Amino acid sequence: MINLIDTLLKEIQEVQVKTAQEVEQLRVRLLGKKGEVTKLFEEFRNVPAESKKEFGRRLNELKNAATAKIEELRQNLEDSAGASECSFDMTMPGDTFELGSRHPISITREEIISIFKKLGYSLAEGPEIEDDHHVFEALNFPPEHPARDMQDTFFISNGVNPILLRTHTSSVQVRTMETQKPPIRVICPGRVFRNEAISARAHCIFHQVEGLYIDKGVSFADLKQSILLFVKEMFGPDTKIRMRPSYFPFTEPSTEVDISCNICGGKGCNICKGTGWLEIMGAGMVDPNVLSACGIDPNEYTGFAFGMGVERIAMLKWQVKDLRLYFENDVRFLKEFETSI
Ligand code: PHE
């Protein structure tokens, strides 16, 4: 019987199979209820007592070898199946990723920029972390000037020229004037920061697009016509503008621009609070002091500047009255703008 164990062991070591079916047949032949190994176990009781120990050891060895071999053969077949016949169809179309939509602020900003690009303006950008010189001083805000209070500032460091978060993108206009020679015609979009309590109508972060045009003989009439052209493109050809006198340290004269209410057509409604007009931007002729501070001769050149809040324009365009919605990024809100791209 030891001979039989040896023969079976040898056979097990050399066995080769091609299919899972053959592995199963082998398992049944050796380890099945009537299998050869099982039968040998049954004959164990007939083995003389003195050989039981040796026989038992060899029998267990055989059983373990058979079990291990069958497992190994199975594994090999599975591995090669995985490698040769791919279990998925590579020609199937892939899972599509759901596309996001553009943010209403981006849509509005791009629209404003594209209108001014058509008028010959080029894009200028600058840092969000600025210094006092570019945000205030060069723009004719003397130290301690009360106009600085108009824009509550986040300061990063104190000193002779404090570092701060820009409160408007007029700082980019300063940088442009300092580095370029007129004629200058730039549009400066960007994020700005003011230390204000967050509410439906105010936020500590918002976006602006400011513009600057400097050349020989630029007049207030040019400013008026450029803004009129812009609002007609942005809000429709019937839109009218109205300019109210205002004050900014960096422009003289200064004005605040209103458009006729695009909801009621100027008759008066709750959006325009019955006035028929909606404020959209500040503007004015660049103050000669600003031109000098930036190295441009005010006797030779004049220019105009304007600045608007992108959120404000977006609010008027879509009648979204709570500013906070633009910052919360609730997908249900953002999805409403998918078709506006
Ligand atoms: N910088 C001004 C603001 O942030 C807007 C403005 C720009 C006004 C240019 C006049 C001219 O409020």
Image: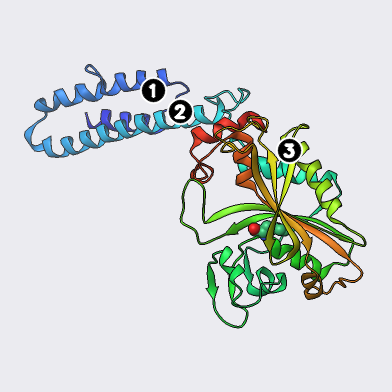
Residue denoted by label 1: 23
Earlier residue among tags 3 and 1: 1
Structural crowding at the residue carrying mark 1, measured as other residues with C-alpha within 10 Å and reported as few (<14), some (14–19) or many (≥20): many
Q: Amino acid at mark 2?
A: Leu
Residue at position x 64%, y 31% from top?
267
Counting from the top left corner in percent of width and height, residue 296 is at 85, 71
Residue at position x 66%, y 76% from top?
142
Q: Quadrant of the N terminus?
A: top left
Counting from the top left corner in percent of width and height, residue 105 is at 62, 43
Residue 262 located left or right of residue 213: left
Residue at position x 54%, y 43% from top?
326
| Structural distance between the alpha carbons of marks 3 and 2 | 69 Å
Residue 293 has which mark? Answer: none
Structural crowding at the residue carrying mark 3, measured as other residues with C-alpha within 10 Å and reported as few (<14), some (14–19) or many (≥20): some
Residue at position x 92%, y 62% from top?
216
| Structural distance between the alpha carbons of marks 2 and 1 | 9 Å
Residue 103 visible at all: no
Q: Amino acid at mark 3?
A: Met
Residue denoted by label 2: 77
Earlier residue among tags 2 and 1: 1
Counting from the top left corner in percent of width and height, residue 273 is at 56, 38
On whether ligand 1 comes within 8 Å of the CB at mark 1, the answer is no
Earlier residue among tags 3 and 2: 2
